[in-house]
Amino acid sequence: MSIVRYYLLLAFLLISKISHSSERITWYINHSPPAYILTGQNKGQGYVDRILKLVIDKLPQYQHQIISATTARALHDMRSGKQACNMTMFKTAERENSIEFSLSSLMSPSLHLIISKTQANTLKLKSNVELKELFDKYQLTAILMQKRSYTPKLDALFKRYPHLVHQRSTISYDDYYDMFLKDRGDFLIDYPAIANYLLTDKASDYVFLPINGLKKYELAYIGCSKTPFGKKVITEINTVLNDLKKSDVYQQAMSSWLTEKELNNDYYRFYKETFLTR
């Protein structure tokens, strides 16, 4: 190889490296403790905060920008083709048209009905609540986070009762729960860990009931814009996840806010047999 060709090749590789390292991934998050904790004494110690850091540390070839935004804003920017990603997304047929999904990045106990003990006792509600009955028989109202997916099954159900669903667009789950505590609706659908954290000393006034038709554990995924850039990023993220998910540090991060009751044999079996294989 001539000296001229050698230096041309060297220059090309250097330019390519600089160009690649200047690529930026924008990560969208919102205050939803204990998943993301953006304020207070536990700031940055949410279980998704910790997992996102593990993933970012394994992608040093990119610049990483973290933005606090509503789910609606994150979805809009991904669908607009921006270099945007989100750590915690359910897969739906609609989303797969415009979003590239990774291997599973998170698992958690399923969504529950969050309702006051007084209301639950009055209606004699127990495990495996049938949400359709709450709408049809009792005309109860739900408070939902705008553009958030509550699993395809529940999303389809909520669309059938628009007059009984109050959707809240907010950057913070604090506002969402504040609306609930002010009796703007009869119930929420959320994860027990989040409800426990945000209801604080009032948590004992509420019950968290499993919902009929939902699996015991749910999987979430990293989603990025469905563009050549997004597909490339997801390919690299999958390589990272294949290794990270097998590590103790990843499992410990994901389970860091679960109770001893939730960390049972079923949880660890699902982690090993399902989460690690998808």
Image: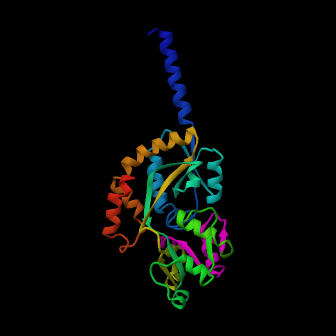
Establish if 218 lies above or below 125: above
Which quadrant is home to the N terminus? Answer: top left
Colouring rule applied to residues: rainbow
Whether residue 59 is visible: no
Whether residue 185 sits left or right of residue 263 in the image: it is: right
Establish if 121 lies above or below 5: below
Question: Start and end of the magenta stretch?
Answer: 165-194
Image quarter of residue 176: bottom right
Q: In the image, what residue occupies the spot 44% across and 80% down?
A: 127
The percent position of residue 232, horizontal first and vertical second, equals: 51, 39
Q: In the image, what residue occupies the spot 63% across and 49% down?
A: 79
108 or 163, which lies in front? 163
Q: In the image, what residue occupies the spot 36% across and 58% down?
A: 274
Image quarter of residue 168: bottom right
Q: Is residue 12 magenta?
A: no
The percent position of residue 43, horizontal first and vertical second, equals: 52, 63
Q: In the image, what residue occupies the spot 66% across and 46% down?
A: 80
The percent position of residue 201, horizontal first and vertical second, equals: 52, 81
